[in-house]
Amino acid sequence: MTTEATPAHIQLGMTDEEYDSVCEILGREPRPAELAMYSVMWSEHCSYKSSRKHLGRFGSDQPWVVVGPGENAGVVDLGDGWLAALRIESHNHPSFVEPYQGAATGVGGILRDVFTMGARPVAVWDPLRFGPLDDPHNRYLLEGVVSGIAGYGNAVGVPTLGGEVEFADRFSKNPLVNVMALGLLKQEQLVLSAASGEGNKAILLGNATGRDGIGGASILASASFEEGDEGKRPNVQVGDPFEEKKLIEACLELYDEGLVVAIQDLGAAGISCATSETAGNGGMGMDVDLDNVHVREQGMTPGEILMSESQERMLAIVAPENEQAVLDLASKWEIDARTIGEVTQGPELRVFSDGELVAEVPAASLADDAPIYDRPAERPSYLDEVWADEPSIPDEVDVVDALRTLLDDPAIGDRSWISSQYDHMLFLNTVVEPGHDGSLMRIKGTTKGLAVATDGDAFRTYLDPRRGGARIVFEGAMNVAVTGTRPYAVVDNLNFGNPENPEVMWQFIEAVDGMAWACEELDLPVVGGNVSFYNQTDGVDIYPAPVVGVLGFTEDIPTKPPRLDAAEHDMGIWVIGSEAEGDLAGSAFDRILNGSLRGRPADVDGDTARRVITSVADLASSGTPVVHDISTGGLAVALAEIAIKSSIGVILDDISADELFDETPLRAIVVSHHEPITPVNCRRIGTVGGADLDFGDLGSLPLADAAHIWSSALPRRMN
Amino acid sequence: MSVAVVVFPGTNCEHDIVHALDLIGVETELVWHTETDLSGADGVVLPGGFAHGDYLRTGAIARFSPVMSEIDRLAALGAPILGICNGFQILCEAGLLPGALVANRDLKFICRHIHVRVESTDSILTNRAEVGQVLRIPLNSYEGNYIAEAIDDVENADLVVARYSNPDGSIDKQGNPNGSTNAIAAITNERRNVAAIMPHPERAAESILGSSDGMVMIESFAASVTAPLSA
């Protein structure tokens, strides 16, 4: 609770020490507008002050990386002049406070990050986490978030190609809404954010600036939640996909015409961030006149204008001779454009309002001089307890009943209740649609293909942050490999609790280590990422929930990539990859049927991972009808998915209950008329046919029942 | 022969229809909504999207865009005018086609492949198809639910070009994804030179994308552009 007596910097979420640093940089007390700028730019969300020390472990020096972390999006080379831009972000707290707008503006923000680089955004993915759906509030959140993503994404005209969803009690009051975007561009279209050229103009494009989203980065995204924080709703921005669509087209035309020197989107911290970053990145300064900012309402203070997070705005740096052409082009696309500043020798960023100087700060200091914290970390006390209790599958298990229960789980059952609300076909690039392990797109006019899978595993990351972190990377790599592409680059979104809790910090450091190690083993560059801390409500931290988006790439897109609905009568069924080793810690069987979360997830060997992933990609790119990663729910669920989607049963020869529900990673099902030729372990387990999921002596489940349970799991809870 | 593909602010399927027409060698030109002279065009497509943000009501603002008076003029001359999805909504708002499109029965956006059964081949959308032919094409809309006050007139004048159906061509509630009256998915005008369809035939133009069933509609439109129906 703040009172009259609370100092301004505390109200803005700064510590006393941070305030002292600002005074030191300026050699004086900051003016109100200056304090506003530092408070947002030095917030956890903008400055990564608790995480930056650890993020250096992610590598990105592979030769195909064109732009690594630090810019608005990572960029990789696809050959023949083609580049791909990718980025992932979170909008967790805004989506809890206002699910529709929180999720919608998350989509808007990530798209701007991508087209800021000169790329046309071509697809979006949404990894989501919610509390259990028996709570009506969680249903409200899921409904609102999905509507927001659909409402914004469909209208702005960028297809949503997938994502994933998990449900757990720890996400009840802190849902996670992550969003990843992919853009395509030609080499010559690449634009960066560093302003250069004294006298160049800074032109603000797009929406009017209003009071929405003031302090979104510092107050919403960088603090824990308590009961009653719904009052923070005014801190959530409001999205306008129509404005964004016009802005995308206008910006892409600006790049085509070669009219901009640099460009930056206005996201967290609004004008403060965009002006200081463009100037600071170029080693320049900037003079900004707030009187020229088109505002939505009267009486906004300079601090409010500087901090506003109103959506759908871009700042373009333009040579003076092109100023009029830019304004004309904006007018054609019916978007507002005003020259609000000019690049100077610097290094000061000077802001004027009503003819008066309201801020004068070293431009680079807002980003570069932000504090870096080495927060204490401590191994969580729960680990010994959960590791001491290894789950197992009871001897007397009824396999058919168990499978029924698993198929009814909303994170295992058909998720098309979500994905059919998203337009996933626009642009005519979608070859493998949502509902598969990874989605596959073509690049028109080439033979190239791109796949993306987003993956997270909060349960295993909780049970062992290092192994859990590594396994989501391997899982994502498997999921793009089954589309016939090679894992090519990664972006990560690190969702964690309160970093001031040493146990959370330990989870974070361990998970980063595990992820960085796995990426190194697979020679996968991490080209961008985002950290979302303070996912804590009423003192409860979320399960550590890092999410990766893995990009897969192939020069020769398969003409018939594997599909889950391609199984046909008499085809053989094989399991390839690692041997099942009884890996049940964090498994769906143990969580859902035993109702427990315990054990220690198995470690993964890097050599094995490389061999299996390569072999899977080889099989998938050579005409194999079905290649399906075995993950949540094990072999039983993976087989059921193939059977249900292909509308034909499966007959297993001799299978044990243990193997059916085991979740040992790096295993895949292959269904084909021909025995797979592969250097990794490969064992035939059955045949496609009949109208049942036939597990031999273990029992059999009619396919129609399985299909009904699976397809109603989510709708029956939501409708 | 050249087809004008009209782009309103908020239109987003313009490149998709251009791509599908290009597959069969039809030249296209993107035309901004402020254009007032389409005299060089032999046919017009109003593609899908969210013209003017769908604000107020789908198509309600677009009908006042400057280009629409030129489309009125071409329609009166008998030129083939095709609306897809949002283009259907705009043509209804503009009074070039009867009826209107309202929110889907389940109040949710629908994005999936559905089936339509061809009801009439006397249209710029189906002149290469066969009556009873069932096509698997994607539906991608929130306001796709067709209604018409004068539904009997629409039916009696044989204006229904295609209906939503089950894969076997049967028509019932289950095969009607959005609650459209009489399962109507596509209609034409009485002169049969203006037609519109809610699902997206251009998204089913290549088998690598899951279906090429929509190509017969794209080809039908191309054929009518080559030989415009005369007055």
Image: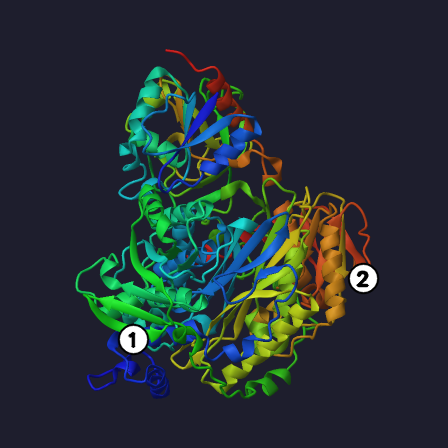
- Residue drawn at (40%, 66%) of the image: A279
A698 and A612: which one is in front? Answer: A612
Quadrant in which residue A652 is drawn: bottom right
Does the residue at mark 1 contact the one at mark 2 (Cβ under 8 Å)?
no
Residue A453 location in percent, x, y?
58, 58
Residue A290 location in percent, x, y?
25, 63
Circle 2: residue type: Asn
User: What chain does badge 1 belong to?
Assistant: A
A314 and A650: which one is in front? Answer: A314
Disc 1 versus disc 2: distance between alpha carbons?
63 Å
User: What chain does badge 2 belong to?
Assistant: A
Q: Residues within 10 Å of mark 1 (few under 14, many from 20)?
A: many
Q: Is residue A16 above or below residue B11?
A: below
Residue A34 is tagged as: 1
Q: Secondary structure at mark 1?
A: helix
**Count of marks placed on residues:** 2
Name the residue tied to disc 2.
Answer: A681
Quadrant in which residue B216 is drawn: top right
Q: Which quadrant is the C terminus of chain B positioned in?
A: top left
Q: In the picture provided, is A385 more to the left or to the right than A123?
A: right
Q: Secondary structure at mark 2?
A: loop
